[in-house]
Image (cartoon, rainbow, N blue to C red):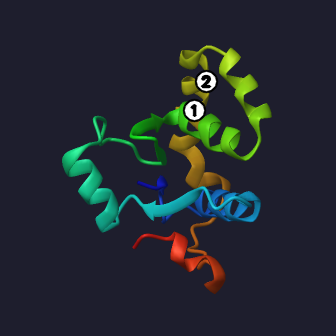
Amino acid sequence: MHNIIFFDGDCSFCNKYIQFLIKFDKDNKFYFATLNSQTYKKFSDNWIPQPDIDSILYYKNSNFYYYSDAIIEILSDINIFFKVFKLIPQKIRDIFYKLFARHRYKFNKNSCVLPPKEVQYKFLD
């Protein structure tokens, strides 16, 4: 099974984050699906223990990562340096993550960014 990053396709900040990941995913570790995709629906109906996620969810090695753990795990797959952020207690990280996620639409106007053709295969639906 692929490493899948589920994201809010309506959030321009989330879309920019996905574009950033595509740029630095030199080893083709990531596949992507929006939170309103059929892929997400299949996962949420069968496997996702917390279906109330509204920003980023990471599926890797049969595990689900939520909130700040998802961001750190994804970035650590690009560069091991990012694991240093796990030294910050999860409760503290998640407070900031949830605060940012709740207000992320204020930071950018909504816009959908279409992926370049050479990476469209990474988008599951």
The secondary element bearing badge 1 is classed as helix
Q: Residues within 10 Å of mark 2 (few under 14, many from 20)?
A: some
Residue 11, image quadrant: bottom right
Q: Quadrant of the C terminus?
A: bottom left
The amino acid beneath tag 2 is Arg
Residue 88 horizontal/vertical position (percent): 68, 16
Residue at 56%, 78% in the rendered image:
120
> Which residue ends up furthest to the bottom in the rendered image?
117
In primary-sequence order, the first of circles 2 and 1 is 1
Give the left or right position of residue 80, taking residue 115 as reference.
right
Give the left or right position of residue 33, taking residue 82 as reference.
left
Q: Nearer the viewer, residue 9 or 43?
A: 43
Q: Is residue 117 in view from this perspective?
A: yes
As drawn, the label of residue 48 is none
As drawn, the label of residue 93 is 2
Residue 72 horizontal/vertical position (percent): 64, 35
Q: Is residue 73 above or below residue 5?
A: above
Residue at 39%, 43% in the rendered image:
53
Residue 79, image quadrant: top right
Q: Is residue 107 above or below residue 19?
A: above
Residue 33, image quadrant: bottom left
Alpha carbon of mark 2 to alpha carbon of mark 1: how far? 6 Å
Q: Is residue 121 above or below residue 5?
A: below
The secondary element bearing badge 2 is classed as helix
Residue at 54%, 42% in the rendered image:
101
The amino acid beneath tag 1 is Ser
In the rendered image, which residue does mark 1 sit on? 68
Q: Nearer the viewer, residue 36 or 10?
A: 36
> Which residue ends up furthest to the right in the rendered image?
81
Q: Residues within 10 Å of mark 1 (few under 14, many from 20)?
A: many
Residue 26 horizontal/vertical position (percent): 74, 61
> Which residue ends up furthest to the left in the rendered image?
45
